[in-house]
Amino acid sequence: MGGLGVKAAPFTYVAHILAVAAAVLVLVWCIHFRGGLAFESSNKNLIFNLHPVLMLIGFIILGSEAIMAYKVLPWSRDVTKAIHLVLHGIAIVLGIFGIYCAFKNHNESGIANLYSLHSWLGISTISLYTIQWIFGFVTFFVPGAAPNFKRGALPWHVLFGLFVYILALATAQLGFLEKLTFLESSGLEKYGTEAFLVNFTALIVVLFGASVVVAAVAPAQIEETPGYSPLPDN
């Protein structure tokens, strides 16, 4: 992308704007339309509401910040690496807690677990994400790995990380679709405000994820083409 004159910075700006929009929309949905958030409640739907909030804000958005850290933070590479590691670690913890809330809701409501593609991909995503984090911690953070091994592993670490991130985005889309389908089959108006809000939130998440991926693969700075010199200022 550097050859096309595209830098990461504009995409990180767009991603942050979309992240705020997605976070606000999912909170409006779960608090205003779905009744609120609770870890313990006689209304088990309030327990489930923690799931989309934690998975979007805690897992996907925070994980996105970790991905973009190398492109937006002005500090040394060691400091940025530590922030990258910590943010991903927090995202994993919040993601696991978000999944636990879905299980808790199902168990207390008498609903079966792990029967949908969304749940299968969700468990697969959090597992792969955790494996990726452990590999990155051992290889790039803990002293001792051979420099040649680090150089060879880095492209694969980046590629696999983006694959898991895109898998997380796809899983989120299935989650929005599944929940909205259940609500509409229970009487929610298909062209009502809440249905439009959920679909619009899912669309924002797609655009957000696309911005993060482009920011991740685009260079922080544009390198000049060898042999090219810009026109002098007169």
Image: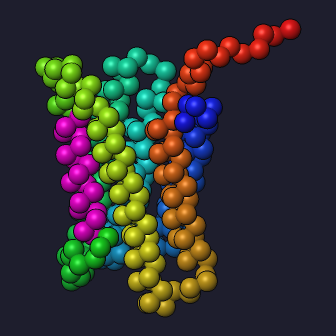
User: What's the magenta region?
Assistant: 119-136
Question: Can see residue 212?
Answer: yes
Q: Is residue 127 left or right of residue 24?
A: left
In the rendered image, which quarter contains the C terminus?
top right
**Residue 22 or residue 50, whichever sits in front:** 22
Locate residue 61, reporting x and y percent: 43, 48
Question: Can see residue 40?
Answer: no
**Residue 81 or residue 54, whichever sits in front:** 81
The residue at 36%/57% (across/down) is: 168
The image quarter in which residue 84 lies: top left
The main secondary structure of the magenta stretch is helix
Residue 135 lies in the magenta stretch = yes
Locate residue 122, reporting x and y percent: 28, 63
Q: Is residue 46 left or right of residue 113?
A: right
The residue at 39%/38% (across/down) is: 66
Q: Is residue 128 left or right of residue 30?
A: left
The image quarter in which residue 167 lies: bottom left
The residue at 54%/71% (across/down) is: 199
The image quarter in which residue 50 lies: bottom left
**Which residue is most to the right?**
234
